[in-house]
Structures are given as C-alpha cells and as structure tokens.
Image: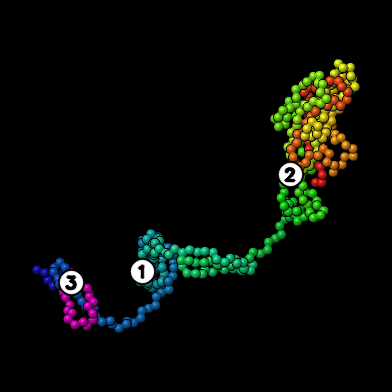
Amino acid sequence: MSNVGEYFASTLIRGIDEGVAKPGVVQAMHGTPRDGSLELMTGTTGDAGVGGQPARPFRWEGDVADQAALTALSSKLTPAHAGKAWRVVSTGALVYWNGAGFDSFAEAFGALGPDGEPCAITIGTVDTGPAGSDLQVEVVGAPPNLTLNLTIPRGIKGKKGEPGGPGPIRQAADYATGTHVDRTVPVWDSATEKWKPRPYPGLRGPWTIAEGQAWDGGAGFAASQSNISAAFHPIAQLSVPAQDVDWRPMIAGGVVVGTTDGAGDFSSRVDAEVRIGSVDGQIVALGSGMVWGADSFNRFQPYYGARGLTPDSTIGVVPAGQPVTLHVVLRRNKGTANYDYTMANAQIVCTARPVGAL
C-alpha cells in the first residue's frame, strides 16, 4: 500500500495564474503512486527585496584550454578574484568567476550571430585637408543606404627630383601644333616663330631597272636590236610612285649603243635620253653617244636643257602627289647612220631630289 509520502514524491507542483483574489477559484491536487499534480495559484506581488552587492568589475584574463584546465584553475581562486573571466577554447564558452564559482555563458565565442541587414555604401565627397592633418571620415544617411565623405590630408612637398631626359619635341612650346606626318622634319617658320613639320628634304628612292627586270616587277629594258633605222627608239619605261613634295629626277645608269658603218657615215651620233611622261616629254637625263662606228656605253647624267637653272625653276619638276613614268629613248641626234642597241648591262637608277622651300 502506498503512503502519502510516496504520493507527494511523484507529484508535480506548478503555479497557475487565474487572477489574484478571483472568487470561485480553488486549488486542485491529483495524485497516484506513479504521478500527480498540485496546482497552486499565483499570489500577490510582494515587497521589493534589499539591493544586492554591485557586480564585480569584469577583468579579462585570456584563454584556458578545456574544462580540465578550468577545474585546475578554480582551486586557486578566492573571493578576491571575483570578476575575472576566461574563454574555454575547447567549447567557446565564456566563464566568469563570481567569487564562489563560475558563471558560464555557452557559445560566447565562435557562435553565429543573427544575420545583419545588407548595407550599401557609396563614396560622396573627397576633399583635401591641410598637410599633416588627420584623415576625416563622415558617414551620412540611414542604413541600408550610407554615404562616405572623406577629407584626406595633403602630402608634404617632396624633394626635387633629378632632371629628366628630353621630352618629345612636339610638346615643346616653340613647336607648332597640328598634324605631324611620318618622315617629316622640323623647319623654323620665321612668320610664326615656331618650328613646323616639313616633308623630309633628303633624296627619296631609288627606283631602278636592270636589264630585263624593273623594281616593281614590271617589264625591263627591251630586247637587243641591230641596224635600227628609226630616228628614235623607246627601250624602257620606269614607273615612280607619287611623292609628298615637288621633286626632280636624278638619273644614273646607261645603255650600250653603237652606230653602224655600212653607210660610210662615221659622224652620226645616237644618244640615250630619259624624258618625263612620254618619249617627247621634258628631258631630265642624257647619255651622249660616240660619232664613230663602235659600241659605247651611253652613261646617263642629269640634263634639263636650260641655262641658269635655279631651285625655283619648274623645269624637270614632278609635282607632289603625282606618279610619273620616265621613258628611256634612243635618239639619233646627228647624222643618218643606223645603230645597234644591246640590253646587256642596260640600267637606269632614279632618285627623287625635293625642290622648293622646305
């Protein structure tokens, strides 16, 4: 048979709040040898108790490895050590010595905190403060939209550096601005008192024909021919591309020509000529022949058919931007004898000499 003590040993006592001094509410108790319950109604609020001792100052002492190390430490602590706190590395707990024992705060270290609200920060104003001043940072706005304003101290003046190398000539104060074409050279302009780009004043080229082959892969000199009776006989055409300046051809080379002696005329002379644009164009080179019946090498020399030639003259000048064909012609300039021409060793070399003010 169960006794009263056994009944109470298995009884759960709990308080219920049915309202203080509410009429018609009674306390209930129900019990068996196995379980039971006793309901006690909540009473009225009592008087405030006496204030406790102020909390001891929190003093951080660092880490202890685990619970065993903490137990060993507790044997050395007294009430005078109250307020000291450690982290238990193995569990991440914070322990606080209250003077008599440890108060433990589980997962004080390493546990995930609540998700924060995303925040967008944009850079606002960036000003420069006096040299030596502190960096000033101002955050304005309300989360999640914040603006960061900065005042950055000005740096102190540095030491004077070593002199640098010369800069690009086009950046010089006395060089005229504008387009600068490749291969141009600076020339002083007294009107503006500045240097200006001008086309390269040196020789251009060369362009050549050697026997049966031209520089551009075109046809070379004509095949050898004997007993030519025509007053003039074309033997080659040299193509020269357009240049960026006016220019005169400077011709070198020559061909082998000889008069025949069958007519008994040993005073005939056949010259080799170089002319601009056609077989009758402006002559720019002449290779004088011999007046006896033998082969000779008519060597080209510049020839413009005018006296007192000056740099400003237009004789023999090819305009800028205009391609030109130079015609090599054999011409009988004296007598009536026939003549022979040999392609072997025939050659012409043209270089372009700029003319006019550069």
SS for tag 2?
loop
Left or right for 8, reference 209: left
SS for tag 1?
strand
| Residue ID for mark 2 | 183
Q: What residue type is labelled 3?
A: Ser
Q: How crowded is mark 2: few (under 14 residues within 10 Å), some or many (20 or more)?
A: few
Which residue extends farthest top? Answer: 262
SS for tag 3?
strand
Residue at the spot 80% in from the left edge and 36% down from the top edge: 249
Please say whether residue 160 is one of the residues in the magenta stretch: no
Q: Which of 105 and 225 is in front in this view?
A: 225
Residue 37, disc: 3
Residue 217 visible in the current orientation: yes
Instruction: Tell me which corner region of the image, top left, top right, bottom left or bottom right, holds residue 26.
Output: bottom left
Query: Up-down: is 204 above or below 130?
Result: above
Which residue extends farthest left? Answer: 1
Residue 256 visible in the current orientation: no
Measure the alpha-carbon separation of dots 1 and 2: 89 Å
Residue 50, disc: none
- Estimate the x, y position of residue 236 in percent, counting from the top left: 76, 28
Q: Assign the N terminus to one quadrant of the image.
A: bottom left
Q: Which amino acid does label 1 sit on?
A: Asp
Front disc: 3 or 2: 2
Residue 103, disc: 1
Please say whether residue 13 is one of the residues in the magenta stretch: yes
User: Which range of residues does the magenta coloring cover?
Assistant: 10-29
Do the numbered discs 3 and 2 sit on residues whose CB atoms are within 8 Å?
no
